[in-house]
């Protein structure tokens, strides 16, 4: 009898300790606007994942895949539109998995008394967009989902929200306090003996500070900036890890200009004095299995050098702006000792470079070229504006290019013209044919417009079929992240 009593007494002591070693997740409610706050506790630093189950115990959404999380309580903010397809009214199960065990709680959607219908027809997240276009931010892969005001990592990749993009482009950023040609490692743990999971470029590359620890380390997230000869071969992967706090510094940026490059649309958006000044067509990196490092690295950067012309094999790239060690924003290249731009210009609007960003040289609808952008940013007195922010948006799974309205005006030359145009006074058309004849985007597939190609000066919207092809690809993958898997 004494042994039985001692056994139960032992249970009373170890039960609280055992409970503290298990993960926990609190009940949550989906707000009317579609957002939700999920709180959970990790007993010790370990890999964890969080998924959503329907009433029949089937996994419907991956909230975050297995990743290393710190000990303690976490609060995860999921934006409106995160769950695609959207959730029906009813009760769902939040399942938190860690090495030490599992925890479950309830996510209530709408009226709890309404039962969730069968999901036999529902696609998995791998077959559906991750979220609405407006909700997807550069930190989509983050397990933390913070909401920092005017932050690159927390601002939706939505070029139509001019005010939000401008506030992001002019907000201070945190960089590594090293020479602009040097790199430092991001560590899996706050310990220089732990695994190096990413590389960060000094002075020009931004990082997202999530937590400053008392032990002299900071938890940050960023895209790995590994190059072909880097020791850490992790190409353009979004990583969360640790860096010494004393290596970080916050810097102010230019308040007149800012640049966005979007891999989804293959466009450069040039901002001036709070407004989207113009849009230029570009080409970002085209990777292949043997050269995964050709992928243009996404992230937040500062322009650090007005280099001018650079040489790549037998190509000359004029008006080059250096922003990330040896990454450049430059005019579409031409063959050395000639003015032959054909090979590069034929690929504008698609991935084509070795990692740099090629920008159109032909005058667009607003009178802009890469040369004009360069000259606006360059100060002939040598007081160069090296603090201009350049951000590069990743084409994450779920991002979509909107289809233009049928009433969108387009133009063409009925006297033998082969292109359709954005404006009636296009710089690519001889003056005697101006102004061009108008029609609408909704008529583009009809004769006599169906065989017209987009003008390489004013760059009108792509045809519906071309947009739908890009959107279909992004329903199932994040093209810019593919080669990151090879690097690991």
Image: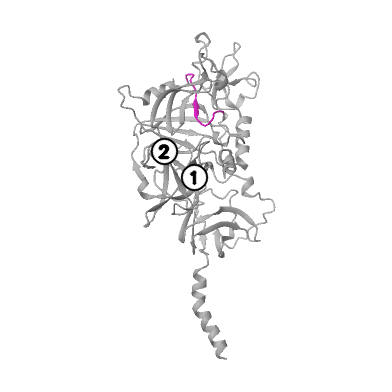
Q: Mark 2 points at which residue?
A: 182
Which image quadrant for residue 421?
Answer: top right
Is 125 rendered above or below residue 450? below
Q: Does the magenta stretch include residue 357?
A: yes
Q: Nearer the viewer, residue 409 or 346?
A: 346
Left or right: residue 467 versus residue 268 is right
Q: What element carries label 2?
A: loop
Q: Is 463 in front, or is 16?
A: 16
| Residue visible at 51% across and 71% down in the picture | 19
Residue that protrudes farthest toward the right in the picture: 120
Q: Is residue 219 above or below residue 465?
A: below
Q: Can residue 231 be seen in this view?
A: yes
Quick one: quadrant of the C terminus?
top right
Disc 1 is placed on an element classified as strand
**Image location (x, y in percent) of residue 69:** 49, 57
Residue ID at (40%, 25%): 307
Residue 225's place in the image compared with 310, above or below, is below
Q: Give the range drawn in magenta.
A: 352-363
**Dominant SS type (magenta):** loop
Does residue 314 show up magenta in the picture?
no
- Of labels 1 and 2, earlier in sequence is 2
The label shown at residue 467 is: none
User: How many neighbours does mark 2 have within 10 angstroms: few (below 14), some (14-19), or many (20 or more)?
Assistant: some
**Does the image show residue 154?**
no
In three-dimensional space, the C-alpha distance between marks 1 and 2, rounded to whole angstroms, equals: 14 Å
Q: How many numbered markers are drawn? A: 2
Q: Name the residue under label 1.
A: 198
Q: Which residue is painted at 34% across and 43% down in the image?
A: 250
* Residue 46: x %, y % from top left: 52, 59
Nearer the observer, disc 1 or disc 2? 2
């Amino acid at each position: 009898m004494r042994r039985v009593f001692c056994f139960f007494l032992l249970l009373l002591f170890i039960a609280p300790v055992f409970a503290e070693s298990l993960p926990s997740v609190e009940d949550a409610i989906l707000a009317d606007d579609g957002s939700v706050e999920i709180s959970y506790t990790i007993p010790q630093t370990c890999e964890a994942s969080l998924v959503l189950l329907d009433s029949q115990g089937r996994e419907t959404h991956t909230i975050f895949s297995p990743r290393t999380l710190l000990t303690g309580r976490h609060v995860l903010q999921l934006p409106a539109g995160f769950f695609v397809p959207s959730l029906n009214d009813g009760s769902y199960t939040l399942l938190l998995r860690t090495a030490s065990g599992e925890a479950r709680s309830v996510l209530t959607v709408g009226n709890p008394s309404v039962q969730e219908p069968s999901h036999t027809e529902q696609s998995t997240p791998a077959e559906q967009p991750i979220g609405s276009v407006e909700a997807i931010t550069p930190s989509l892969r983050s397990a933390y989902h913070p909401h920092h005001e005017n932050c690159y990592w927390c601002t939706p990749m939505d070029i139509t929200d001019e005010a939000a993009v401008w506030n992001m482009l002019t907000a201070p950023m945190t960089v590594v306090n090293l020479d602009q040609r040097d790199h430092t490692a991001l560590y899996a743990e706050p310990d220089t003996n732990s695994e190096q999971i990413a590389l960060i470029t000094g002075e020009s590359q931004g990082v997202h500070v999530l937590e400053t620890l008392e032990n002299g380390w900071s938890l940050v997230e960023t895209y790995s900036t590994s190059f072909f000869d880097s020791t850490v071969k992790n190409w353009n992967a979004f990583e969360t890890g640790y860096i010494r706090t004393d290596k970080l510094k916050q810097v102010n940026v230019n308040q007149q200009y800012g640049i966005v490059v979007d891999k989804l649309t293959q466009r450069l958006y040039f901002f001036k004095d709070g407004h989207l000044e113009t849009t230029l067509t570009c080409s970002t990196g085209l990777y292949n299995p043997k050269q995964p490092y050709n992928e243009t690295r996404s992230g937040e950067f500062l322009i650090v050098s007005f280099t001018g012309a650079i040489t790549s094999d037998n190509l000359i790239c004029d008006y080059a702006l250096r922003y990330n060690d040896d990454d450049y924003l430059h005019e579409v290249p031409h063959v050395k000792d000639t003015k032959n731009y054909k090979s590069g210009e034929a690929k504008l609007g698609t991935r084509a470079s070795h990692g740099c960003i090629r920008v159109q040289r032909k005058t667009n609808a607003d009178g802009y070229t890469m040369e004009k952008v360069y000259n606006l940013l360059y100060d002939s007195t040598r007081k160069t504006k090296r603090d201009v922010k350049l951000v590069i948006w990743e084409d994450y799974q779920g991002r979509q290019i909107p289809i233009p309205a049928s009433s969108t005006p387009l133009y063409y030359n009925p006297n033998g013209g082969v292109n359709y145009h954005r404006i009636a006074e296009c710089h690519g058309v001889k003056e005697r044919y101006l102004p061009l004849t108008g029609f609408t985007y909704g008529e583009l597939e009809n004769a006599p417009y169906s065989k017209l190609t987009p003008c390489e000066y004013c760059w009108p919207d792509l045809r519906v079929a071309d947009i739908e092809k890009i959107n279909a690809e992004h329903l199932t993958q994040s093209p810019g992240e593919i080669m990151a898997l090879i690097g690991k």
